[in-house]
Amino acid sequence: MMMNKRLKQLEGAFTEFAINPLKRLIFGEKKIKNFDSLKNFVMERTAYVTQVTLNGYIRTRIGVMFVKTLDDQSFVKSIEIAKWNIYVIALQDLLLFTFSYIYNKYGINEIERLNVLYENILIEQKVSGLDDEIKNKSLNEFNERLPNINWQTYFKQEPFQKSCQALFYWAPIAEHLKDLDKEIVFNSMINQWKNVISDFAKLFEGIDGEGR
């Protein structure tokens, strides 16, 4: 009974963050035909991947030796901090992947829109709990990444490594245990991203019309 209560407390930290992407998965997704639908896809899939991988990693470790930490509100707060720090990097990775993909597969070059699109998404996430410090830091990091991206090759050369690193770094797990978990943690996130890549290829129909 106590175990169930604590697990529900942990899951509650993710409920609001995950509800929209889960609804999409249940009721189906619209084709990606313009920047509005592209933005929605990127936002929701990033939220879902972040939620599933972070939640899964913590639940695995809770079952071993972290159960008592759920009685500590500071631990729940650390999950919230980890969630947003992982999300902003995962969002960068998916945006860079999609723009590199459509640049190569469809000859569509809209790369100059990326920093504005990223900032707009972060602004929208403030109502869900993203604070200004994380937002501003991630904006600076993204602007530093952009000039170094090879748009012809990014989408096929381990495009999600930084989000895997962010999950590994920010997950509130003891450092001596993380050394044992690195390969598993990276693989769990990469597998989630593979599903996103597959869905994106199926849903993408171009960038045209309203929202362009």
Image (tube, grey):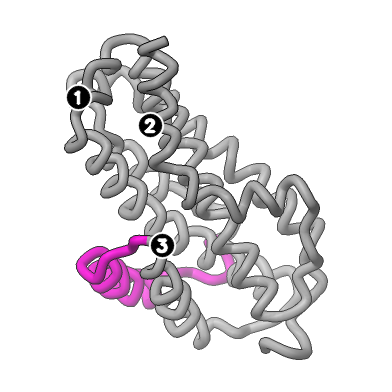
Per the rendered image, the range of residues in magenta is 129-154
Crowd around label 2: few <14 · some 14–19 · many ≥20 (10 Å) = many
Instruction: Tell me the element at label 3.
Output: helix
Q: Is residue 132 left or right of residue 123?
A: left
Reply yes or no: does residue 146 show up in magenta. Answer: yes
Question: In percent of the image, x 48 and y 51: which residue is there?
Answer: 16
> Could you tell me which quadrant the C terminus lies in?
bottom right
Q: Earlier in the sequence, mark 2 or mark 1?
A: 2
Crowd around label 3: few <14 · some 14–19 · many ≥20 (10 Å) = few
> Could you tell me which quadrant the N terminus lies in?
top left
Question: Residue 106's x, y, as percent?
Answer: 76, 75
- Residue 120 sits in quarter: bottom left
Q: Report how far apart the C-alphas of labels 2 and 1 lie in the structure.
A: 17 Å
Which of the labelled discs sits on residue 128, or is there none?
3
Instruction: Tell me the element at label 2.
Output: helix
Decide which of 58, 191 is in the foreground and name it: 58
Up/down of 91 relative to 36, above or below: above
* Residue with the mark numbered 2: 10
Instruction: Say how many tags the image has.
Output: 3
**Residue type highlighted by circle 2:** Leu
Question: In percent of the image, x 79 and y 51: which residue is there?
Answer: 27
Question: In percent of the image, x 61 and y 66: which residue is there?
Answer: 98
- The answer to whether the residues at label 3 and label 1 have Cβ atoms under 8 Å apart is no
* Residue with the mark numbered 1: 174
Instruction: Tell me the element at label 1.
Output: loop
Q: Is residue 75 left or right of residue 154?
A: left
**Residue type highlighted by circle 1:** Ala
Decide which of 2, 206 is in the foreground and name it: 2
Q: Earlier in the sequence, mark 3 or mark 2?
A: 2
In front: label 2 or label 1: 2
**Residue type highlighted by circle 3:** Ser
Reply yes or no: does residue 143 show up in magenta. Answer: yes
